[in-house]
Image (cartoon, rainbow, N blue to C red):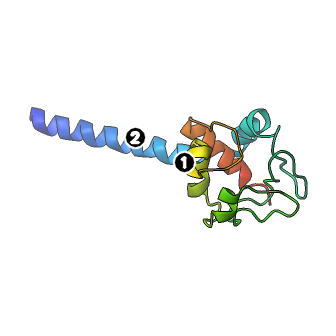
Amino acid sequence: MTDRLIFVLMLALATSSLATSSASAAEGDPARGKAVFQRTCENCHAAVIGVNKVGPSLWNVIDRKPAIVPDFAYSDAMKANKQAWTPTTLDAYLADPRGDVHGVKMFFKGLPNPADRANVIAYLQTLR
């Protein structure tokens, strides 16, 4: 084999393993997500229906329209947000809440770790 062929094969192998690790991180682990949720989110958000805290209940949040939980006083910025809470929109929001939806009341700085976000989103998907 030539050095160029070996390089191309090694590059292809490295790229495929990166794609595999990215896909598995994007899927998330609900059990790990629950642990992150309990230590990071639960002080302000309930995981059960009908219980609002500082933030609204996150029960059935996946694919839900923003700012529709009864008896919660949303910011004008969140009321203006029209994108449903899909895994993709939640990932962007959880990375930087105040940067993603300018003017929200949430003081949380975000989850910088993509695996933590994927795990929390996987956990939120179980709340139905």
Number of other residues with Cα within 10 Å of mark 1, as a class: few under 14, some 14 to 19, many 20 or more? many
Against 61, residue 41 (above or below) is: above
Q: Nearer the viewer, mark 2 or mark 1?
A: 1
Task: Decide if residue 1 is in sight here.
Answer: no
Image coordinates for residue 35, horizontal then vertical, percent:
75, 36
User: For the residue marked with disc 1, what is the amino acid?
Assistant: Ala
Location of residue 59 (image quadrant): bottom right
Q: Which mark is residue 100?
A: none
Image coordinates for residue 119, horizontal then vertical, percent:
65, 43
Which residue shows up at 83% across the image and 45% down it?
A: 54
Which residue shows up at 33% across the image and 37% down it?
A: 14
Location of residue 2 (image quadrant): top left
User: For the residue marked with disc 2, what is the amino acid?
Assistant: Leu
Image coordinates for residue 20, horizontal then vertical, percent:
45, 45
User: Which of the pair 63/29 is nearer the observer?
Assistant: 63
Q: Which mark is residue 26?
A: 1
Q: Which mark is residue 18?
A: 2
